[in-house]
Image (cartoon, rainbow, N blue to C red):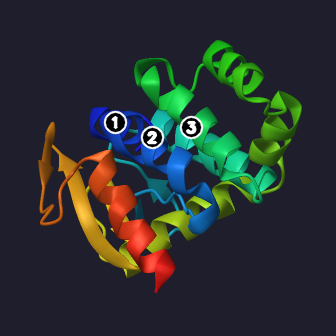
Amino acid sequence: MSKCPDARDCLRDLVVPAMEQVVDKVNFTLSFIGSVDTNDSIHCKHGPGECLGDMIALCAGDLYPKDPVISLGFSNCLVSSYSKIPGRELVQSCALEHGVSFDDLNGCISEEGKGLDLLEQSVERSQAAGVTKSCTVRVNNKMWCIRDGGEWKDCPNGSDVKSLVKVIEKLYSE
């Protein structure tokens, strides 16, 4: 997902602006699509660089579990320049901009399997939820809207920030 233009558009135009309004009302989880083969190797649609970018984003989430705004802002920064992922300069710049420790990120990715384990769990979570498109937005464990091929699809309640915030607010008040 980290090297996907649909993910960039989805994060920039929908997820980040909505989360700015409802961050205290949701348990946000960023999950990635891919496949795990019989040798436990993980494959990402846009290649190994995307797998590394996904691991970097997941490590940020793991390092700042109580503050999704930090990790989501960092991930949005990365995906905004997705063609440069996993370049060190981009990662360092986004880390500095969003208050993420580059050394801790590097440690998570380099640590004995930590980043890879996070990616494998993420891919398995997406598979278990039946998610096959990047970007699929899920609310309350149900598919809410998909960004695919540069278009919003399967969005019966709308594909804009206001609609997403409205559904989250409604669920939160119940």
CA distance separating discs 1 and 2: 7 Å
Residues tagged 1 and 2 counted as in contact (Cβ below 8 A): yes
- Residue type pointed to by label 2: Pro
Looking at the picture, tell me which residue is in the foreground, 134 or 85: 134
- Residue type pointed to by label 1: Asp
Compare marks 1 and 3 and give the one earlier in the sequence. Answer: 1
Q: Left or right? Give the position of 40 relative to 99.
A: left
Disc 3 target residue: 75
Disc 2 target residue: 17
- Label 3 sits on a secondary structure element that is helix
Give the residue drawn at x 52%, y 49%: 21
Give the residue drawn at x 73%, y 26%: 95
Q: Left or right? Give the position of 83 relative to 112.
A: left
Query: What is the x, y in percent for residue 53?
Result: 55, 37
Note whether 85 is above or below 2 in the view shown: above
- Residue type pointed to by label 3: Ser
Note whether 28 is above or below 87 in the view shown: below
Query: What is the x, y in percent for residue 2?
Result: 45, 38
Q: Left or right? Give the position of 133 relative to 101.
A: left
Compare marks 2 and 3 and give the one earlier in the sequence. Answer: 2
Query: What is the x, y in percent for residue 103?
Result: 87, 31
- Label 1 sits on a secondary structure element that is helix
Q: Which picture quadrant has residue 169?
A: bottom left
Figure quadrant of the N terminus? top left
Give the residue drawn at x 51%, y 60%: 41
Disc 1 target residue: 13
Q: Which of marks 1 and 3 is in front?
A: 1
Q: Please rate how many residues cluster around mark 2, counting C-alpha atoms within 10 Å: few if below 14, some from 14 to 19, many from 20.
A: some
CA distance separating discs 1 and 3: 14 Å
